[in-house]
Image (cartoon, helix red, strand yellow):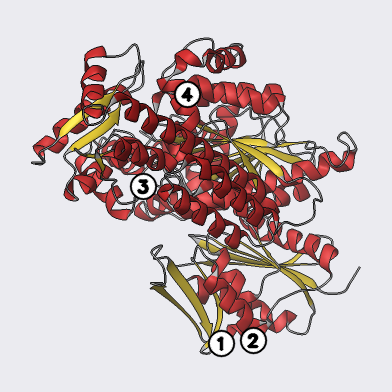
Amino acid sequence: MRLTFPHMGLLSLPVETLLNGLGHEAVPAPPTNKRTFELGAKYSPEGACLPFKINLGNFIEALELGAEGILMGGGLGPCRFGYYAQVQQRILADLGFRFQMFLLEPLGGERQELYRTLQMLLAKVPVFQAMAAFRLACRKIRWVDRGNALLRSMLPRSKDRVKAQRSYERFLGAMREEKTPEKFGAHYRELEGELRADLWPEAEPPLRVKIIGEIYMVLEPRVNFHLEMLLGEMGVEVVRAMSVSQWVEEHLFGFFYPHHRRRTVLLSGPFLPSFVGGHGRETIAEMVDAGVNRLDGVIQVLPFTCMPEIVAQSIAPAVSATYRLPCLTLVLDEHSAEAGVLTRLEAFVDLLRRRRAVRTEAGRVPSGVPG
Amino acid sequence: MEDGVYLGVDVGSVSTNLVVMEPGGRISKKVYLRTEGNPIASVQKAFREVAPEFAGVKVLGVGVTGSGRQLIGAITGADVIKNEITAQGVAALQAYPEVRTVLEIGGQDSKIILIENGVAVDFGMNTVCAAGTGSFLDQQAHRLNLSIAEFGQIALRSKNPVRIAGRCSVFAESDMIHKQQMGHSLEDIVAGLCAALVRNYLNNVAKGKEIRPPVLFQGGVAANAGIKRAFEQELGHQVMVPEYYDTMGAWGCALLAQEERAAYGKSRFRGFQLTEEEIRVSGFECVDCPNRCEVVEVKIDQRPLAGWGDRCGKWQRINAEATG
């Protein structure tokens, strides 16, 4: 079947690999662009969050390219995402598109839906081949995420930041095409070599800022104004716990990785002892983690009207005060303007720089140790 | 200390400010003009106003801030191009070194800066709503045929402010008109509007932030005594308005230019002749790669001076070569 799926950061790399390996044809939507925003905003309920709108825009653009089926995630708990697929399905049907919607519900969600989706996905190839495709996709996203983390740590130290980003894009291109898992590591090492060849000698460690918040807004550079690249270009090392591979481990296979959940519950416990849906609890947990590890600051990114993140936002000042950790909250939607985001980021980075300079001078923190 | 002056320019949505600062921080001249949608012309005009007096004086450094900072930074040859938040914070600390909270309401944005031991530790800025900023107050004052200063004085006379819906500026306006038609007095309506804007500010911009005294209130809107009093009533302690409340951004970046001078010892200022040059700005879509960046190019007397908007840095680089 010609299948499409929503874009979310690097997600398309493993999903394309998986679908093609399962004998389907992946029809990825064009990378999220101005038209995606326009289509999504036009046909979505005004109050829905930006991820809903962009997903819908992606689907429309992919259906125009001839996709016959849509593979979409499901969800549990008090975040509206759990109903997105159903609402999007009806909107698209009303627009006259003919397609089938397949839901990847988490275990513990709608069993029948999950069964139906798996049946469709696995219909084309023998089980052993499906297993191999799945393993390939998992390994691919791990390496891709590793490359992304490498860029985030190297970019602030790069002599030529444009060149570093070019190298990274070449790496992504090569990984997208690569079908031999043994070569993933070679591509990664090639990227590492290129990045390391062009670094300033280690002086003062760069500012370290952690990105937290709603997963889609965090992982999709095309909706967050390339936040991580902007910060990297300002000389900031971006740290984040969230990634596609982490999401797969936690969301789809949480059963095999119970320590992820235990860590979240443990860290967020003193501030937010209950599940508020989405990644509200993770946001607080990661903020506490940033405080404990003495990062310079955190940036919370959320789509306008996101309930779980609003809960986290109102708890953030308490975490900020406890760990003396500055937090910048960016609320984004299709009306957000780049200039505003840039101004806030610049001001935040300035604040962190001045703060560190004073701390270092005061001798409370020996130089060379991230304060 | 070197002889000369530092220049600070704040190009905002509503006003363009220029300050001439002596080394050390004293302001010897300030110019406050309306931007009127034309940042280049208003900056040229501002420079023309100070040129006769200072043309013979050595300019030690130039700092630029405000929403037009990139463009004006290129045109003037600024040494520091800074965001408004940093600039405002630096100026507030210069005015009152012991300040803990800075409330700033400008033409189109409002911010809060929290300061501990002389360093900004947190800030907030309006994100999804601009109700309650200067341009709305401006509009309403205009509609009621009042100047901003009068507006505040009238509000102070009110004994019984009416409640105005303050979340959205358009609804606030309909509510005000409604209250007028109902026969409420002008001062009660104006005072009600001030209270509504302060509530909106505290609920949006300052949400979750602890406002500790001493509190400084700056930005163009600080001229409005009604808003100042509404803040004091809502916060329960005194709010100070610094002397240069309406040019704090410009002053802050002049101070930053002084810091920069201390570190690098020279200035890139292009000179006062910029008031007479023909400055052209054009935008185009670069088609060299699929990013399709919207590039802006500035030309002075036909020579390219600066460019930006490109993700790859090509246009920025071409211009760096052109200017050396």
* Amino acid type at mark 4: Glu
| Local SS, label 2 | helix
The residue tagged 2 is: B273
Q: Is residue A85 left or right of residue A153?
A: left
- Of badges 3 and 4, the one in the foreground is 4
Dot 1 crowding, Cα within 10 Å, few <14, some 14–19, many 20+: few
Q: Position of residue A210 (x, y in %)?
A: 61, 35
- Of badges 4 and 2, the one in the foreground is 4
Which residue is rendered at x = 35% and y = 18% of the image? A106
Which residue is rendered at x = 69% and y = 82% of the image? B271
* Amino acid type at mark 2: Gln
Q: In the picture, which quadrant includes the C terminus of chain B?
A: bottom right
The residue tagged 1 is: B277
Q: Residue A128 or A266: which is nearer the viewer?
A: A128
- How far apart marks 4 and 2 lie (CA) works out to 63 Å
The residue tagged 4 is: A249
Q: Position of residue B178 (x, y in %)?
A: 26, 38
Q: Residue A50 or B50: which is nearer the viewer?
A: A50
Q: Position of residue B184 (x, y in %)?
A: 33, 35
Q: Are marks 1 and 2 on the same chain?
A: yes
Q: In the picture, which quadrant includes the N terminus of chain B?
A: bottom right
* Amino acid type at mark 3: His
Q: Which mark is residue A6?
A: none
